[in-house]
Image: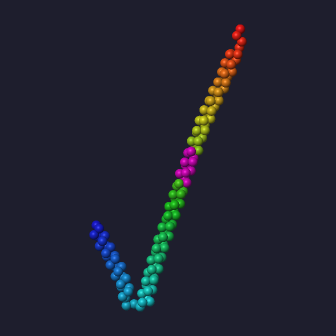
């Protein structure tokens, strides 16, 4: 498999070298050859710029999608936390009411015990 990769790489490198030598030794004028090289460089620059812009747009789109997903998840967490907080508050209010009732009973018993202990013996 690596031999095939080396062969393909060799063919590509040979083709690039051959194309470069063909331009250098072409019977065309130097100004025409320079113009061809410049045109090819500008075309490569344009393709690279388009690829960069496409990649940038894709990254922006993915980032926006991820941000929306994260915001939705955060909103869901906050909603769940709010409902749980309400449940906890309700539970605490019930326990507080029960403690208040027990405290009233304790105070009532304390007053009754104090009254019984203060009655004259006689």
Write down the quadrant of residue 115 in the picture.
Answer: top right
Q: As rendered, which of 65 and 120 lies closer to the eye?
A: 120
Look at the picture and state if 66 lies above or below 110: below
Residue at position x 53%, y 60% from top? 64
Q: How many marks?
A: 0
Q: Is residue 110 left or right of residue 84?
A: right
Label the magenta part by its dominant secondary structure: helix
Quadrant in the picture for the N terminus: bottom left
Q: As rendered, which of 116 and 28 lies closer to the eye?
A: 116
Q: Is residue 85 magenta?
A: no
Look at the picture and state if 5 lies above or below 42: above
Q: Farthest top residue? A: 122
Q: Is residue 100 left or right of residue 57?
A: right
Residue at position x 50%, y 64% from top? 59
Write down the quadrant of residue 6 in the picture.
Answer: bottom left
Q: Is residue 119 left or right of residue 87?
A: right
In percent of width and height, residue 12 lies at 34, 76
In percent of width and height, residue 101 lies at 64, 28
Residue at position x 56%, y 45% from top? 80
In percent of width and height, residue 62 lies at 50, 61
Look at the picture and state if 12 lies above or below 65: below
Quadrant in the picture for the C terminus: top right
Look at the picture and state if 100 lies above or below 55: above
Q: Is residue 73 magenta?
A: yes
In percent of width and height, residue 87 lies at 58, 39
First to last magenta residue range: 71-81
Colour pattern of the rendering: rainbow
């Amino acid at each position: 498999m690596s031999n095939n990769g080396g062969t393909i790489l060799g063919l590509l490198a040979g083709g690039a070298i051959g194309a470069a030598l063909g331009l250098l030794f072409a019977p065309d004028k130097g100004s025409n050859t320079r113009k061809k090289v410049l045109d090819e460089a500008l075309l490569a620059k344009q393709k690279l710029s388009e690829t960069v812009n496409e990649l940038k747009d894709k990254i922006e789109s993915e980032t926006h999608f991820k941000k929306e997903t994260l915001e939705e998840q955060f909103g869901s967490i906050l909603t769940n936390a709010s409902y749980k907080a309400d449940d906890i508050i309700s539970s605490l209010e019930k326990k507080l009411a029960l403690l208040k009732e027990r405290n009233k009973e304790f105070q009532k018993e304390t007053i009754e015990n104090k009254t019984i202990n203060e009655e004259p013996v006689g």
